[in-house]
């Protein structure tokens, strides 16, 4: 038995609008939509799934409290993806730059306040499907600092 995947879920007060944003601005396609009016949806791009749920209370709390949950998306050919997002009118929160964790990254803020950290690994030899390899590569480069485990 093993886990095989995880899918982030974005809370919104307007599922249809959020799906349209991800389609038109970020290039995703609708995977499914449920309800009339919609209460749940899935979008997909190159095998990457994101779910969208109608949760007006959570969406409102995030906005009122100025909270911005992160979604981290690994891509190939980041400069091309970045230019596509800029041309389509994405709100760039952080410009593209090389980061100390061996990634080239930029950040988009979606209409719900979520921050999409879009990155490409700087070292193409490292396979991000194998997390231990990533950590070891960072340790070898002196760019990984172990955080002590959190205990209650």
Image (cartoon, rainbow, N blue to C red):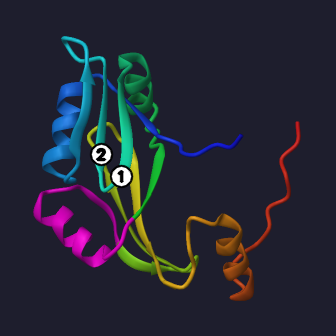
Q: Is residue 87 covered in magenta?
A: yes
Q: Which residue is rendered at x = 85% and y = 52% of the image?
A: 149
Tell me the quarter of the image containing the N terminus. Answer: top right
User: Magenta stretch?
Assistant: 75-95
Q: Residue at x 67, y 81 (%)?
A: 137
Q: Position of residue 124 (x, y in %)?
A: 48, 83
Verify CB contact (< 8 Å) between mark 2 and mark 1.
yes
Q: Residue at x 37, y 34 (%)?
A: 51
The residue labelled by disc 2 is 44
Q: Secondary structure at mark 2?
A: strand
Residue behind mark 1:
47
Q: Nearer the viewer, residue 61 or 134?
A: 134
Q: Nearer the viewer, residue 63 or 55?
A: 55
Q: CA distance from mark 2 to mark 1?
A: 6 Å
Q: Residue at x 26, y 29 (%)?
A: 32
Label ID, residue 19: none
- Specify the quadrant of the image occupied by residue 58: top left
**What is the residue that sits farthest to the right in this orientation?**
152
Which is nearer the eye, 49 or 17?
Answer: 49
Q: Is residue 101 above or below residue 9?
A: below
Position of residue 56 measured from the top left corner of the image (x, y, whole percent): 35, 18
SS of the residue under disc 1: loop
> Measured along the vertical axis of the image, is residue 115 above or below residue 16?
below
Q: Quadrant of the C terminus?
A: top right
Near mark 2 (Cα within 10 A), the count class, few <14, some 14-19 or many ≥20, is some
Residue 66's image quarter?
A: top left
């Amino acid at each position: 038995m093993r886990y095989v995947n995880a899918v982030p879920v974005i809370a919104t007060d307007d599922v249809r609008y959020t799906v349209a944003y991800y389609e038109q601005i970020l290039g995703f396609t609708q995977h499914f939509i449920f309800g009339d009016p919609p209460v749940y949806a899935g979008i997909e791009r190159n095998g990457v799934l994101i779910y969208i749920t109608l949760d007006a209370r959570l969406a409102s709390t995030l906005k009122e409290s100025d909270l911005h949950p992160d979604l981290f998306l690994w891509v190939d050919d980041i400069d091309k993806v970045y230019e596509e997002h800029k041309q389509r009118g994405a709100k760039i929160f952080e410009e593209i730059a090389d980061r100390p964790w061996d990634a080239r990254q930029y950040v988009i803020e979606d209409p719900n306040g979520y921050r999409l950290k879009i990155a490409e690994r700087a070292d193409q030899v490292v396979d991000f499907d194998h997390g231990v390899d990533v950590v070891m590569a960072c340790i070898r480069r002196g760019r990984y600092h172990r955080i002590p485990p959190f205990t209650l």
